[in-house]
């Protein structure tokens, strides 16, 4: 990157610039969790079908994940600050459109536009921070504050969403973004200098198209199958098209001199294990947070604010275990801590799958906290390993891949686990639901628990009580199927990811020139003379 300014910014300007750059990070991370609290209210007001409900949640995440690397390339060409300002404008406009969306389809479109804007914010802020802080020690602190703001947004989302829904309509969870975006647009040009690459890499349009052609048809096939309760010919065709596009995408990346995704990084088993672990961790965490918010509100009858406060132990467990994991790694090593985290999270998932259809608030909170406590080491250590495993000249590409894996894992978690739960719920409610309902009411009952509860409010007392109980049990059955699936995936991660981390560490294990052992960096690998057969625990 190059700085067009003749003099680097002073210390005060750098830290003020960092404060500005944390604003969009908080917004984009907050937008993922704030919607989990709001989705029961949204389904009650807009009455979307099961497919549209998942797209309301997913369209943001898929556009965000699919465009992160692309936007990083565009920022190199037009300037990171300029891209940040353009993306902030798009994000703010889309947030206002989402707040006043009159139909589920309009809300999906607005959420997709928010994803496009959000994809410009994350890579732009991190890149600008790297250029603002040229001193390694200051840069480490700044990136730590950037990471903290990411966690703060995730933690703030449910609480802020609960407060807003107590006082305002559901659109307020989107409209709250607008004043922050206006502030960002006003002060960023004054406090953040522009940076752009003197030799930007040409963007390969075919790779961009193939990446979307690989992801979106597969997701549509999954959701369509859940909605229809069986794979349709269209869904099978979409699945095949997506898989073929994915193969074509990977083959093209191997041939390009400047690929959109640097597949060569995956030659290092540590890098592959960390990327896989980060994606699977977010896959499970976001999927269960979606069910947890709905369970607390629609099954247990908590208000949005109380449900948000009930989720706070999950946030606390994530923060505490993230710190503890970094302290335990020097003693036990990355593979062991990573695997232990995956096992703990899997146990929490299986415990959550047994939550009852009544009087299960404490059960749900404890199980969710266990999941968060297990996911935290996986996420924290994965980022550390990814950055440390990549060569210095490819650290930017490695960071972009890490962010993409995280966002894509979150989106797929909602898509896959949400579709599994929806399929089980629909199969149960349509098979055992009350007879004699009008076709429109029967379709609404089968779409979601929130819609079923709305229909029950219009029935006489006895049929209403029967439908409410049946719908809540059907939802819990779907929740159980989805969380068992997530738990099994985490069990697989507990086996595969530590193996890859261990294999990469054994391959690259080195000692310093004095023979005293490793001087571990961020991923526990030192420079010096390579040795074989050394205890893996020593390399941390």
Image (cartoon, helix red, strand yellow):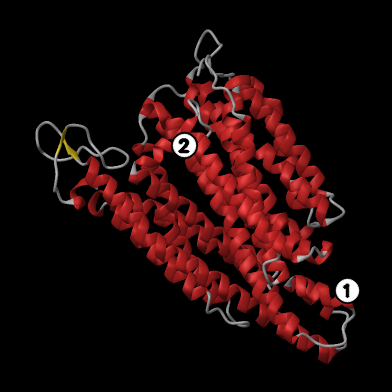
Q: Which mark is residue 177?
A: none
Residue extending furthest toward the bottom: 462
Q: Is residue 394 left or right of residue 537?
A: right
Residue extending furthest toward the top: 6
Q: Earlier in the sequence, mark 2 or mark 1?
A: 2
Number of numbered callouts drawn: 2
What is the x, y in percent for residue 151?
52, 48
Identify the residue at horizontal 72%, vertical 59% (top origin).
234
Residue 49 drawn above or below residue 142? below
Q: Is residue 518 left or right of residue 245?
A: left
Circle 1 packing at 10 Å, graded few (<14), some (14-19), many (20+), is: few
Circle 2 packing at 10 Å, graded few (<14), some (14-19), many (20+), is: some
Q: Which mark is residue 399?
A: 2
Q: Which structural element holds mark 2? A: helix
Mark 1, residue position: 440
Residue 68 drawn above or below residue 487? above
Q: Is residue 507 left or right of residue 163?
A: left
Disc 2 and disc 1: Cα gap in Å?
48 Å
What is the x, y in percent for residue 52?
76, 59
């Amino acid at each position: 990157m190059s700085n067009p300014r003749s003099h680097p910014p002073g210390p005060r300007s750098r830290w003020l610039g960092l404060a500005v750059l944390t604003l969009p990070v908080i917004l984009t991370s907050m937008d993922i969790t704030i919607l989990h609290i709001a989705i029961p209210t949204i389904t009650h007001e807009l009455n979307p079908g099961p497919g549209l409900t998942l797209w309301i949640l997913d369209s943001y995440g898929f556009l965000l994940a699919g465009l992160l690397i692309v936007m990083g390339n565009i920022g190199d060409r037009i300037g990171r600050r300029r891209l940040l300002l353009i993306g902030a404008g798009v994000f703010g406009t889309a947030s206002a459109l989402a707040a006043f969306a009159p139909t589920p389809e309009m809300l999906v479109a607005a959420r997709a536009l928010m994803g496009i804007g959000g994809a410009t914010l994350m890579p732009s802020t991190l890149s600008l921070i790297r250029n603002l802080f040229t001193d390694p020690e200051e840069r480490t602190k700044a990136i730590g504050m950037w990471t903290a703001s990411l966690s703060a947004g995730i933690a703030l989302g449910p609480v802020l969403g609960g407060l807003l829904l107590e006082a305002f309509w559901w659109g307020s969870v989107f409209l709250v973004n607008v004043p922050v975006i206006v502030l960002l647009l006003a002060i960023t040009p004054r406090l953040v200098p522009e940076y752009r690459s003197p030799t930007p890499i040409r963007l390969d349009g075919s790779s961009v198209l193939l990446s979307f052609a690989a992801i979106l048809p597969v997701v549509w096939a999954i959701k369509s199958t859940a909605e229809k309760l069986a794979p349709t010919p269209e869904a099978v065709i979409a699945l095949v098209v997506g898989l073929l596009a994915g193969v074509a995408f990977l083959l093209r990346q191997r041939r390009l001199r400047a690929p959109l995704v640097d597949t060569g990084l995956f030659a290092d088993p540590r890098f592959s294990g960390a990327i896989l672990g980060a994606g699977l961790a977010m896959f499970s965490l976001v999927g269960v947070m979606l069910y947890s918010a709905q369970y607390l509100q629609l099954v247990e009858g908590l208000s949005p604010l109380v449900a948000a406060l009930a989720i706070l132990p999950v946030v606390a467990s994530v923060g505490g275990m993230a710190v503890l994991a970094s302290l335990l790694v020097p003693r036990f090593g990355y593979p062991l801590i990573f695997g232990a985290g995956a096992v703990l999270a899997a146990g929490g998932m299986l415990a959550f799958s047994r939550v009852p259809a009544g009087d299960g608030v404490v059960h749900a909170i404890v199980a969710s906290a266990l999941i968060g406590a297990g996911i935290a080491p996986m996420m924290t250590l994965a980022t550390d390993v990814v950055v440390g495993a990549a060569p210095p000249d490819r650290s930017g590409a490695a960071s972009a891949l890490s962010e993409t894996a995280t966002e894509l894992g979150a989106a797929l978690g909602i898509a896959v686990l949400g579709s599994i739960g929806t399929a089980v719920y629909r199969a149960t409610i349509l098979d055992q639901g009350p007879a004699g309902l009008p076709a429109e009411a029967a379709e609404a009952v089968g779409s979601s628990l929130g819609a079923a509860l709305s229909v029950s409010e219009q029935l006489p007392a006895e049929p209403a009580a029967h439908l409410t109980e049946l719908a809540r049990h059907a939802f819990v059955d779907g929740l159980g199927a989805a969380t068992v699936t997530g738990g099994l995936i985490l069990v697989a991660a507990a086996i595969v990811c530590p193996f890859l981390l261990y294999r990469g560490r054994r391959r690259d294990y080195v000692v310093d020139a004095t023979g005293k052992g490793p001087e571990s960096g961020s991923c526990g690998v030192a420079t010096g003379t390579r040795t074989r057969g050394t205890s893996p625990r020593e390399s941390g």
